[in-house]
Amino acid sequence: MKYVIGVVRIFVGVLFIISGFIKLNDPVGFSFKLEEYFSPGVLNMPFFEPHALTISLIVVIFEVLLGVFLILGILRKFTLRSLLLMIVFFTFLTFYSAYFNKVTDCGCFGDAIKLTPWESFSKDVVLLVLILLLFYGKEYITPLFRPFITKVLVAISIVGCIGYAYYVLNHLPVIDFRPYEIGKNIEEGMGIPEDAPKPVYEYSWKFKVNGEEQVIVTNGDYPTVNGEFIGVETEEIQKGYEPPVHDFTIEQEGEDFAASLLQEPKLVMVIAYDLRKANTEVFSEVKEVTDKAMENGYKVIGMSASGPEQTQVLKQEFNLGFEFYFTDQTTLKTIVRSNPGVLVLEKGTIKQKVHYNDLEYLTFE
């Protein structure tokens, strides 16, 4: 039993550290996922939405530290109880999301590993069983090192988590798992291979036969039935291939200019998903950067989900020399974790991407 607990302890601890670190790499992205959970359509807790980023930071740092505590074998009761409470909560959350089809991706491993709601729930059930096993054999969980070394390792973990979080919040995620990372081509990301799996649908055909309703299920073909057709219900039983980049448009007055703009040899995108939440003070620096880009032959566009009234006010206030286009807010949040953020593209390929704190590092050749 001692060796079984030892293996489980390391496995659970490492899994919590990896899961926490991936989210710590992108706490803003995890906060967007929490906002989705807090929305009226899911848990209906909108009062938590303004605090999503703070909650995100607390949860991910706590998750990493619990994994460290478990491996080091310290604060045994606190660690095990905290792990149990956390996994019970997330098991309920993932079951609720899966059963009611509320959130399509739990965000457990950020954008690094995408899990379906039922896969997330299954993962949490396995973890729940393993943590209960640790409770059963808790007497075998003992410190790995002497107190001084343990304190040093804990201090390094805490300082490391806080320092890493501070860095990615004020710049961008160190590791970019999204389809808009530097070097990726947006147009290629929207493509669908010829051999890509197609979605599979199930059709429930309703007929009235001899005065009674009869349902016939097929995969698409209209059934041959001697009766009166009533209606048909369609259900997607297997999803088809979804390209990494989807719902990407660059619209102005209802027209999508994405195809032509992604062919520009020199293109700068100024992205602000929501101007109400943006750090508008930095647009004076954005003005300097974009003016320099235009002097060097770059086409500059703004992209926002805010309405034309807001974009026009911003343009006039800072005397911006470019026009704004409309793009879906979720897409803009995915492209860059900065509000605003700036991208430099060459025929659809992302060459540079910066947080508004790093505008001085942009180069225009």
Image (spheres, rainbow, N blue to C red):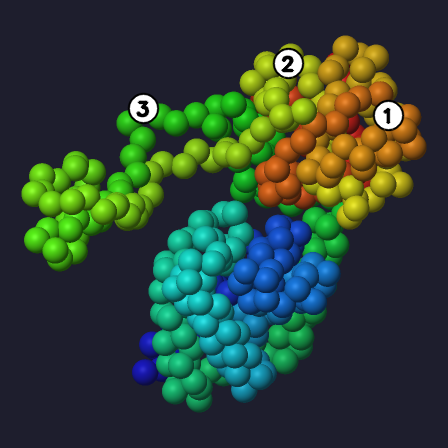
Question: Which amino acid, mark 1?
Answer: Leu
Cβ atoms at labels 1 and 3 below 8 Å apart: no
Question: Which amino acid, mark 3?
Answer: Glu
Q: Residue at x 51, y 65 (%)?
A: 16
Residue furthest front as drawn: 211
The image quadrant of residue 40 is bottom right
Q: From this viewpoint, is residue 192 visible?
A: yes
Relative to residue 147, is residue 107 depicted above or below? Answer: above
Relative to residue 347, is residue 133 depicted above or below? Answer: below
Q: Earlier in the sequence, mark 2 or mark 1?
A: 2
Q: Residue at x 62, y 26 (%)?
A: 254
Q: Residue at x 67, y 24 (%)?
A: 253
Task: Nearest to the eye among marks 1 and 3: give it.
Answer: 1
Question: Would you say 1 lies left or right of 187 here?
Answer: left
- Indicate the secondary structure of the residue bearing disc 1: loop
- Indicate the secondary structure of the residue bearing disc 3: loop
> What residue does disc 2 label?
264
Give residue 320's mark: 1
Q: Residue at x 80, y 18 (%)?
A: 293
Q: Earlier in the sequence, mark 1 or mark 3?
A: 3
Question: Would you say 279 lies left or right of 72 here?
Answer: right
Quadrant, the N terminus: bottom left
Question: Which amino acid, mark 2?
Answer: Glu
Q: Nearer the viewer, residue 337 or 229?
A: 229
> What residue does disc 3 label?
194
- Percent position (x, y) of residue 273? 70, 40
- Indicate the secondary structure of the residue bearing disc 2: loop
**How far, Cα to Cα, is label 1 from label 3?**
43 Å
